Image (cartoon, helix red, strand yellow):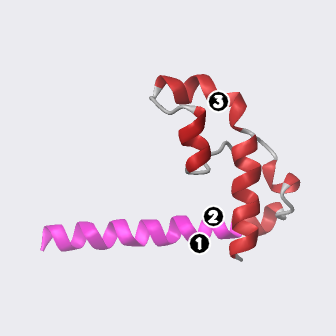
Amino acid sequence: MEEAAYKAALFFNAQIESVNEYLESRGINRELANKFLLGFAPSGYTKEIGIKEETQRKKDLIFYKLLNQAENLIKELIND
């Protein structure tokens, strides 16, 4: 799993040229972007790195459901 994540990070980092101007406006130069493997996910990236779109959608739905549950729990704790 870690190897796949690393390969994906390298792919996204290689796509960063298209957003260099934006990053530089935020004080992030190419050296810093490379150091932390910052990247850009272009439209259709799932096909390019071998992720089936349906699988990615399911993962996204699970993530956002968990995120929503966490937000609701935090709100409940604050209101108690």
Q: Residue pushed farthest bottom? A: 1
Q: Within 10 Å of the Cα at label 1, are there few (<14), some (14-19), or many (20+) other Cα atoms? A: few
Label 1: which secondary element: helix
Three-letter code for the amino acid on which mark 2 is drawn? Asp
Q: Position of residue 10 (x, y in %)?
A: 73, 53
Q: Position of residue 14 (x, y in %)?
A: 75, 42
- Tell me which residue sits at (41%, 72%) in the image: 69
- Tell me which residue sits at (30%, 73%) in the image: 73
Residue nearest the viewer, comparing 64 with 46: 46
Between the residue at mark 1 and the residue at mark 3, the CA separation in whole angstroms equals 28 Å
Judge whether 16 appears above or below 76 on screen: above
Report the magenta residues as a range.
58-80
80 lies left or right of 31: left
Give the mark nearer the N terminus: 2 vs 3.
3
Three-letter code for the amino acid on which mark 3 is drawn? Val
Three-letter code for the amino acid on which mark 1 is drawn? Ile
14 lies left or right of 79: right
The residue under label 3 is: 19
The residue under label 1 is: 62
Q: Position of residue 36 (x, y in %)?
A: 55, 51
Between the residue at mark 1 and the residue at mark 2, the CA separation in whole angstroms equals 5 Å
57 lies left or right of 25: right
